[in-house]
Image (tube, rainbow, N blue to C red):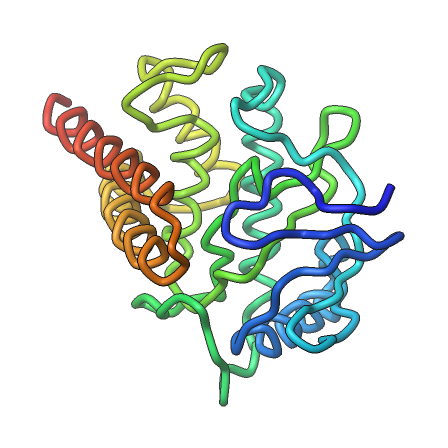
Amino acid sequence: MNGELPGGNMNAVVRDGDTVLRQAGPWTPTVHRLLNHLARAGVDWVPRPLGIEGDRERLSLVEGEVPLYPLPNWVWADALLEDGARRLRQLHDASVGFDTEGAVWQTPPRLPSEVICHRDFAPHNLAFADGAIVGAIDFDFCSPGPRLWDVAYFATRIVPLTAATPEGAPGMDDARRRVELILRAYASEATWGDVLRVAIVRLYDLAEMSIGKAVELGRPDLLRGAEGYVRDAQFLRDFAGDR
């Protein structure tokens, strides 16, 4: 079915047959080069870039269900957070060797620049079918950064590490176990404490970005999102201090 797809927050997405059209930006050619690089490296579950048409980009449609908020209960299964962590590791590993000369990024690179981070790898940007992850979408915010920058954000969204526990989601009393499942599935040497530390920094960074986008796009609703990110960051700071 053609027409606007639900769930877009920063960018309206329109389905056109088995492709999608999205607003392009100065960073789009870099993102398309990255997607082609990932495909050559064996990642076959991300969109294929099909060109830039005026001010819009055309991508292949990633088939599957992309969950909307409030997230359905099945998203919280241990198997999905482990599968997501393995796929995130595959994305990161595949990005090694990407030529960044002349690259334009929508978000600033972070040190150390170990890999190309997705920067929004979370259930709302994953496609699911039959209870399994079948794809990842929305690479607009990608840029070089440390692996843990993505791992900690993924944990924030799928553990979840939030001040208010979503209905049906595991509580913070199960958070450490679930974070350690992610770290083992990713094959990371990071610790629970490392994830909390980076998650806090990451949330403050998201708040600042949301405030900037609210002004740039004339979207006061994004300010509410910024408030939520700050609230979650402060909650995690207090939570980490109590451990």
Which of the image's four quarters has the C terminus? Answer: top left
22 to 67, vertically: above or below: below
> Residue shown at 60%/19% (left/top)?
72
Residue toward you, 106 or 83: 106
Q: Where is residue 113 in the image (x, y as percent from the top left)?
A: 38, 69
Q: Is residue 190 left or right of residue 183?
A: left
- Specify the quadrant of the image occupied by residue 82: top right
Horizontal and vertical percent position of residue 81: 55, 31
Q: Which of 18 and 42 is in front in this view?
A: 18
Q: Is 5 located above or below residue 167 in the figure?
A: below
Q: Residue furthest bottom?
A: 102
For residue 217, side relative to residue 243 (left or right): right
Q: Residue at x 37, y 41 (%)?
A: 221
Q: Which residue is drawn at 79% across and 25% down?
A: 130
Q: Where is residue 111 in the image (x, y as percent from the top left)?
A: 30, 67
- Say if 67 sits above or below 72 in the image: below
Q: Residue furthest front?
A: 218
Judge by depth and name the residue closer to the eye, 80 or 70.
Answer: 70
> Residue 118, how many percent across, how many down?
51, 57
How many numbered marks are there?
0
**Residue at x 73%, y 33% (from the top left corner):** 65
Q: Quadrant of the N terminus?
A: top right
Relative to 184, 210 lies left or right: left
